[in-house]
Amino acid sequence: MTNNQPLPNKGRATYEHDVSPPTKDDIDRIMHRIREEVASEQSSRAQVTEGAVAESAPSPIPEAGVEPFAERPSGPPGNRVEDFLLADDEAFLENAYRRILNRDLDHGGRERFLARLKAKQISKLEVLARLRYSPEGRANGVPIRGGLAVWGLMKAVFRVPILGYLPALLIHLIRLPVAVANQERTTEDLWQAINENRDIVNKKVDHEKFWDVVNGKADNGRLAELESKLAALASEQARLLHKYQDQKRTLLDSQRRLNLLLEEARKRLPEPFDQEQVATLTAAADHWLDAHYVSFEDAFRGTRAEIKQRAEVYLELIRSVGAGTEEHPVIDLGCGRGELLELLKDHNLVARGIDLNQLLVKECRDTGFEVIEADAMDYLRKLHQASVGAITGLHLIEHIPFNQLVQLLDECLRVLKPGGLVAFETPNPENLRVGACNFYFDPTHLHPLPPLMSQFLLEARGYVAVEIKRLSEHRSVESLPLSPAETPDAQALNRVIEFINANFATAPDYAVIGYKA
């Protein structure tokens, strides 16, 4: 490009270095075009507000930070000035050269414009005008809508000392209503953002960083830090809520037992206690750890949803023997929080729960399940022979001494209908981590029961088709992958991996299932 190339019918201005002082005719023509452009812009805004769709071609310029076009487009008609201004300085230059001059940005152009753009010594509009109205740009004739000639010359006039102040002031006065409207919209958007994030403000999480976010000043690192603090706050809130629920449960249980003791004492005062009252007080004392055990279940057993998912394995077994009807219901011994009862109810199967923990019984009844507070043996002894379709006990038999377990199995066999089943789930000590550690999380567990021993016990008490079902579903069990054959010493290494998987990644629970002939 050469110096002092004239704009067609727009006066004279240099396009490489300095600007020659414009004449009065130049300024008159500029102001005339400025008024036309402002009127056109206001008309366009009104059409958009009324819902009219303005004619617009796809933008040839990628957004700021996006890689420039790999191809050299020929510059289809309809290019707009604002489309060129979206990219940052270097990407803007590269795309302007490709769209207007139909070639890549050369070293001379980079040296001439890039540093001045970054230093705000020249505007992008001036660069566009210099490129478009250079001999090369005029030869290509790429149409650019948006008053490029006017705005480019106007920017150049603004730089003229003293003389440039007048048109600049006039332009700002003309655009003042638009600027005020934009500011009002920005203020409304800001308050909307504040209202949407009011919960963050109320939580008092680092107000300075919050306002940085609102003002768009926070970098990604500070945003991530804020999100991390909010997540930690939510986690702490959940923990405190859980602790509050535990304390409330314990307090209510203590209050209930204290009222019972006071009532018994009031009945006999000043007389001494009789045998029945002593038995009542003793029974109340047996439940003093009920709340503690419920808290243990919540902490170590797993969430209600997880236990319900794990119990799905028993659905088809129960259906296969025709259990879950009014004549032959399912009896869930040690029903706990009632996850299996809920699952069976969801599938329209009749089930009844038995448990000794008064708090768990109350919670199940409040949920709408039929649950009886009783000892499993005492309850089974009161049932008629062959009156039950299936009996389940999830994590029950590890709590029962061996002699009582044998008696329990005998009573289950008596009350089952022919073809009915029992299914007892228990921790699997074949998994060394379970057998050596996790089993003893529950202090009421007596000792682990190996699968083959449980299978033998059921067969010895008269059950048929006894099977062991090792359970890994919904238990986060992960095995180590074997090494590829091409790995050095793969065969020896895989033997070690198989040993680890067999002893540490095997099913953490199993069910022993038996049928009545």
Image (tube, rainbow, N blue to C red):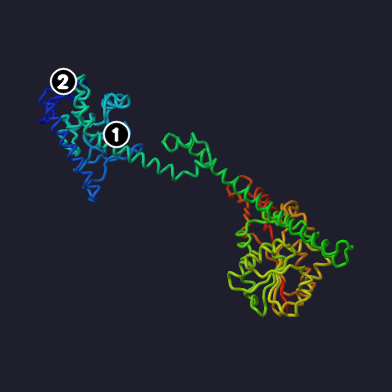
* Tag 2: amino acid: Pro
Q: Which of pointers 1 and 2 indicates the residue nearer the eye?
A: 2
Q: In this view, does 202 lie to the left or right of 510?
A: left
| Residue appearing at x 79%, y 62% in the figure | 263
Residue 452, given in percent of the width and then of the height, sits at 76, 64
| Residue appearing at x 79%, y 68% in the figure | 457
Which residue bears the numbered disc 1?
92
265 or 5: nearer the viewer: 265
- Residue most toward the right? 272
Q: Is residue 68 left or right of residue 217?
A: left
163 or 515: nearer the viewer: 163
266 or 513: nearer the viewer: 266
Locate residue 477: give its quadrant: bottom right
Residue 150, given in percent of the width and then of the height, sits at 17, 32
Q: Is residue 163 visible?
A: yes
Which residue bears the numbered disc 2?
21
Locate residue 97: give its quadrant: top left
Q: Quadrant of the N terminus?
A: top left
Q: Which of marks 1 and 2 is nearer the N terminus?
A: 2
Q: Is 68 located above or below residue 378 in the figure?
A: above
Q: In this view, does 10 lie to the left or right of 90?
A: left
Provide the secondary structure element on which disc 1 rests: helix
Calculate the distance from the C-alpha at mark 1 to the C-alpha at mark 2: 28 Å
Q: In this view, does 74 lie to the left or right of 218?
A: left
| 10 Å crowding of disc 2: few (<14), some (14-19), many (20+) | some
514 or 296: nearer the viewer: 296
Locate residue 69: give its quadrant: top left
Provide the secondary structure element on which disc 2 rests: loop
